[in-house]
Amino acid sequence: MCKAVRYFAPLTSTVTLTKVLKSLVSKILIFRLKQLWRLFKQVGFARIVLLAIIIAGFLVFELHDLISGDYLLAVLIYPLIILPIHLLRKDQGFLRKLDCSKESILAGEYHSLALPYSIYLVYFQQWSTIIIGHLLITIIPLLPSIKVEKRYRANNQFVKWIPVNLFEWRSYFRQRKFFLFICLVLAGLFSAYAIAIPIAILILVASFSEAFTHIESKELIESYPKNSNFLRSKLKDHSIFIHLLFLPFYALFLLFHLELWYILVLLLVIIECSICFCLLFKYSWFGYAQSEIHNQIPFVIFFISTVLFFPVGIAFLYFYWKKAIKALPVYVKN
Amino acid sequence: MLKIKSVNFSYGEEQVLDDLSLEFKAGNIHGVLGANGAGKTTLFQIIYGLLTPSKGDVIFSDNNVDTSQIGYLETEPRFYPYMKGAEYIDLLSHRSPSFDVDIWNEVFKLPLNKLIDTYSTGMKKKVALLGIISQDKPILLLDEPFNGLDLESVENLNLILKELKKENKIIVLTSHILEVLKINCDKISFLYKGSVQKTFSKSGFQDINTYIKSDITQHSESVIQRIFSQ
């Protein structure tokens, strides 16, 4: 109750516009914009434009059809986007330290985030949707967030069969063992349906970028068993590993759907390209200051480009191959 | 002999190293002392080949230094997530088959079968150091190796440094703890605003405190007094 009173207090008091602009909430919002700008710079403006085109395409061709016939869905899009962000955000400790109501800051951020969608709805004159949506957003900051504590458990017996030099996969398997297990088991169980294995593999491949978000230290690159042709060795070792992992599923697919062999060929190409992209993108960022990279957006763009317009994907690979060779240490002969 | 010859480096407009020259002898431990931002880490990154100087050279045995001959311990070592200590050492010692991790771990006492993510700051430092030692390289750049170590580990590291020195390695180390440098080093260079202000040999170590006090902290002292007198 006390929390709610504190939260709504600024709305009931007479606060001038200048005061609001000078407030901590506006400072935080400006800070968030700066963060977004830095993220854009890191991801690359060309990729952001490409992503914006994909999103705009979705908005124009799909979203309107989706929401125009369903009022409830149009309203629910507000909490469906904001609620996961609120529940999983990790900066609540930092916000608590600030000399301002944490809920006001959160509300400021969430309303700003929802603004593009509201503007989109203004175009279709869905006024009641906008009002109810923003009312729902106003309540969200009062909800407690979920404390996600990373659990570090090393003793997963199944990672022992992954060679130690494929540490990216060891790391990924330790983090995502349940997700992998469920995907693979479901794919196996429903392998009689032609769609099951390709979908499971595509979902897994789409998640693989997560295994390559960290760049190892120079010492680890130097110590790679066959570093006389470092990049080629890496690509080869990772490809072999991933195809061995999927081998039972390739076999199951051929067993049940031999007539659809060309789907499997397409899948193999997508898997191969995706692994190459993840590795090449990672090493293209090699440098001291960079230990973690934001590869999700570039990977999504690459993945969609490869699936829909294959040659674009190949162009991406060539570009990052060149970039990775340039970024890696000279003595790692490529 | 490792020679740094008239090295210049800047981050944009900001000149970080300004015509810096230094020499490090084999079988010697050379300390580099300086305030935060004096250019110590930048110097190490240039020697290690992570940064390219705008001017100057790094020469080792009359040739441009081959950075694969250098072991570099960063101030805050970084590791691949969800990797065990044993895996890290296994990968790094790949080319040194004679390296016996178990004997070394009797000194370091690390839980090598646990993920590095669960290690404390000191443990992370130790596993990174163990990795560098396992590679047996002729040049060692140790940036703040004593940070976060407990008393026992500090003593162990002092002993290890002595032994590495006997193996004729070139060891360059930085620390903000002057006493640590005095115990281990044969020479200590004082970096100030990107250049070497003065290099002290062992016989002149007793003058370092007075030198720093007179040149550097006088200004801060008067400012602090002004702040608290308000």
Image (cartoon, rainbow, N blue to C red):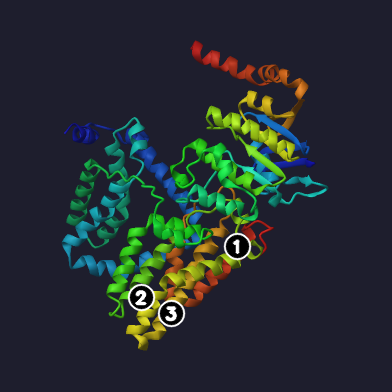
Image point (51%, 66%), residue name: A238
Q: Position of residue B40 (x, y in %)?
A: 66, 36
Image point (51%, 52%), residue name: B87
Above or below residue A219? Residue B143 is above
Q: Is A154 in front, or is A76?
A: A154
Q: Quadrant of the N terminus of chain B?
A: top right
Image point (38%, 66%), residue name: A204
Which residue has dot 1 on it?
Answer: A323
Task: Let me know if residue A11 appears in the view.
Answer: no
Task: Let me know if residue A139 appears in the view.
Answer: yes
Q: Is A261 in front, or is B86?
A: B86
Tag 2, which secondary structure? helix
* Dot placed on the residue nearer the N-terminal end, 2 or 3: 2
Image side of residue A308 versus residue B132, left or right: left
Chain letter of disc 3? A
Q: Alpha-carbon distance for marks 1 and 3? A: 27 Å
Image side of residue A90 versus residue A314, left or right: left
Q: Alpha-carbon distance for marks 1 and 2? A: 31 Å
The amino acid pointed to by label 3 is: Leu
Image side of residue A74 versus residue A93, left or right: left
Q: Position of residue A30 (x, y in %)?
A: 40, 42
Above or below residue A198? Residue B210 is above
Q: Are marks 1 and 2 in contact (CB under 8 Å)?
A: no
Chain letter of disc 2? A
Q: Which mark is residue A266?
A: 3
* Dot placed on the residue nearer the N-terminal end, 1 or 3: 3
Which residue has dot 2 on it?
Answer: A198
